[in-house]
Image (cartoon, rainbow, N blue to C red):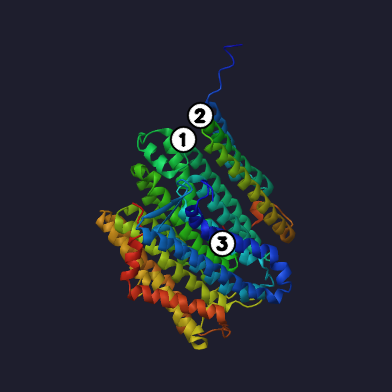
């Protein structure tokens, strides 16, 4: 251990090292250990092991913070910061990656694309997300973002023979790297203004600059565009429905929760960190974007016949609600955003599970009609889907209500009454399209009886997501307290 | 000759970087061939690199150059993956035109 890589640096980096090693190990040994396609399912155990080790590493970091009574473990001279925020978001990524690995096995087998790289890419994407949540410096933040994005481009296009998957991957790649370039341009200007890539230095130097400085405007502008693109916020949301629809459904589930949570982490790191001083400049921008996003997402979801595409538009709307928490900007608001991302992980992942169960070879099972009469065929799956949709709509006693409650509370506390009213009104719209799915499942006669296959992995994922969605809604207090511990300032 | 050749300052490099970035952006927005889109994105990344190196020189600080090297590496990885996706798409569609990607409506 040299002065450039101390034991503490190692402790801080440990989760990323483990994820990277396990990911690369799959790349290297997959052909050798599991040459037959029918054996690839065993790699799920490999991912479970990787997540187990990562969980232990995260726990060790948490224990270190607790033992020494430190708010944060700062490593690599201010490059990474392991604090409550990092650990909480990483717990989210871990759950999302683990559940994704569990639900993918049968889907890929049916599509005839069961390859080991899939599991490796899930782990590498998670490794990128670790850096997005932990970085307090621009270079490592950007590298982490790209590691996640590049893994996702491949995952979205994983069904190499399916034209929809190809097309989605190409669109995601073009728009994703376009937005990354904007973000990089913004970062280069932030570096130029302050002479440092560390967020703390940048924040200190930006406060000495007048807000009308054109270079500062350009820097903040390009950074905002880049981040909003990644988050799928209007007017940069147009990729979301296409990519969500074209990607393999387990990847869509992973993308919609983990990638969004990582983008939220990056958003909070930047806007509560170095850009906090220029709040006057970006707050109206973000408020407008949030209202536009909620409008576009909710109205777009109304007319969809594909449940997958409907969920994609609803994901856009949810990104808008999360943004409103940042616009409110007080303690409740930031806590609300973190809590929202956490709850959203379970309820949105859950909503995709039903679509995965309905998927069969040659039949996508994504349309509203495919869900018709599911209640009589598989009661557990239908009632679970009911819980997820009610939670997504934000109705108590589910967790989704709690998430929206804190966002609206923050908006009222900070005096953004109009935004709160608009937000609440669109909840009514959301209830309409979520309940269309419920009506189809419970009351409609199917043309062809739906065939739902549960399986071990899917069953486990269902149970976890339902338990979390109801559990967090009823026993809210500890989760709100933990979310409160993640505040950056 | 002295009057014609001004000393080159950081501002000149910034204009160059902004010009490269702008040309790349226009390329992505206007062109329809996917290979040209990939090239335009590379151009945007290079605009960022010019910025970073100019600032690195201005501040006499090495971090900008390191950031530049990382961005070059990332751009290479991006190009490799982009071309891979492009080939998969071409095998199935026999076309590399962006406006022929219409199974999923924009």
Give the percent coordinates (x, y) of residue A480: 33, 66
Secondary structure beneath dot 2 equals helix
Chain holding disc 2: B
Question: From the viewer's perspective, is the residue at label 2 or at label 3 nearer?
Answer: 3
Kindly identify the residue that appears in the image at 59 percent across and 59 percent down. Answer: A20
Kindly identify the residue that appears in the image at 52 percent across and 87 percent down. Answer: A377
Give the percent coordinates (x, y) of residue B2: 58, 11
Which residue is at the front of the view, B59 or A216? B59
Extreme-bottom residue of the structure = A376
The first of marks 3 and 1 along the sequence is 3
Secondary structure beneath dot 1 equals loop
Above or below residue A90? Residue A474 is below
Q: CA distance from mark 3 to mark 1?
A: 33 Å
- Crowd around label 2: few <14 · some 14–19 · many ≥20 (10 Å): few
Which residue is at the front of the view, A190 or B100? A190
Which residue matches tag 2? B58
For residue A195, which numbered disc appears in the image? 1
Disc 2 and disc 3 on one polypeptide chain: no
Q: CA distance from mark 1 to mark 2?
A: 9 Å
Give the percent coordinates (x, y) of residue A80: 47, 51
Chain holding disc 1: A
Q: CA distance from mark 2 to mark 3?
A: 39 Å
Which residue matches tag 3? A18
């Amino acid at each position: 251990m040299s002065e450039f890589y101390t034991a503490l640096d190692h402790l801080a980096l440990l989760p990323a090292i483990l994820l990277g090693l396990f990911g690369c190990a799959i790349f290297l040994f997959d052909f050798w250990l599991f040459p037959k396609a029918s054996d690839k399912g065993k790699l799920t155990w490999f991912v479970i092991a990787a997540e187990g080790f990562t969980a232990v590493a995260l726990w060790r970091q948490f224990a270190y913070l607790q033992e020494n009574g430190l708010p944060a473990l700062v490593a690599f001279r201010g490059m990474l910061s392991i604090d409550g925020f990092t650990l909480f978001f990483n717990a989210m990524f871990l759950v999302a990656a683990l559940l994704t690995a569990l639900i993918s096995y049968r889907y890929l087998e049916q599509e005839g694309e069961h390859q080991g790289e899939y599991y490796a890419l899930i782990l590498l994407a998670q490794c990128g997300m670790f850096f997005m949540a932990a970085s307090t410096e621009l270079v490592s933040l950007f590298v982490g973002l790209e590691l996640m994005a590049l893994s996702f481009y491949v995952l979205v296009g994983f069904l190499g023979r399916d034209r929809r998957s190809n097309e989605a991957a190409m669109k995601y790649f073009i728009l994703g790297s376009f937005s990354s370039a904007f973000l990089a341009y913004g970062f280069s200007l932030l570096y130029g203004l302050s002479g440092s890539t560390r967020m703390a230095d940048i924040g200190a130097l930006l406060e000495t600059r007048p807000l009308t400085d054109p270079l500062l405007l350009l820097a903040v502008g390009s950074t905002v565009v880049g981040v909003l693109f990644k988050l799928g916020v209007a007017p940069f949301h147009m990729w979301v429905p296409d990519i969500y629809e074209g990607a393999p459904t387990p990847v869509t589930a992973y993308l919609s929760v983990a990638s969004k949570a990582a983008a939220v982490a990056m958003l909070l790191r930047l806007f509560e960190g170095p850009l906090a001083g220029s709040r006057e400049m970006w707050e109206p921008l973000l408020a407008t974007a949030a209202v536009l996003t909620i409008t576009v997402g909710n109205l777009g979801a109304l007319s969809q016949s594909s449940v997958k595409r409907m969920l994609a538009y609803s994901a856009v709307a949810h990104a808008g609600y999360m943004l409103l928490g940042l616009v409110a900007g007080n303690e409740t608001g930031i806590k609300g955003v973190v809590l929202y991302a956490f709850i959203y992980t379970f309820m949105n992942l859950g909503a995709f599970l039903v679509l995965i169960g309905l998927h069969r070879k040659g039949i996508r099972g994504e349309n509203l009609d495919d869900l018709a009469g599911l209640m009589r065929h598989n009661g557990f799956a239908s009632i679970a889907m009911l819980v997820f949709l009610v939670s997504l709509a934000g109705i108590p006693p589910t967790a989704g209500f709690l998430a929206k409650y804190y966002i609206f509370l923050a908006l009222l506390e900070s005096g953004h009454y109009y935004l709160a009213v608009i937000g609440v009104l669109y909840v009514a719209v959301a209830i309409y399209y979520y309940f269309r799915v419920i009506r189809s499942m419970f009351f409609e006669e199917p043309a062809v009886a739906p065939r739902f296959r549960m399986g071990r992995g899917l069953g486990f994922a269902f149970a976890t997501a339902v338990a979390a969605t109801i559990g967090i809604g009823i026993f809210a207090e500890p989760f709100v307290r933990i979310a409160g511990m993640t505040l950056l300032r | 000759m002295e009057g014609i050749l001004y000393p080159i300052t950081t501002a000149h490099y910034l204009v160059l970087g902004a010009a490269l970035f702008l040309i790349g952006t226009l390329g992505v927005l206007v062109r329809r061939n996917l290979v040209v889109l990939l090239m335009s994105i590379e151009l945007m990344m290079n605009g960022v690199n010019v910025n970073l190196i100019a600032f690195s020189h201005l501040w006499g600080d090495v971090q900008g150059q390191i950031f530049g090297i990382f961005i070059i590496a990332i751009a290479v990885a991006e190009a490799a993956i982009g071309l891979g996706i492009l080939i998969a798409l071409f095998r199935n569609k026999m076309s590399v035109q962006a406006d022929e990607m219409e199974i999923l409506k924009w």
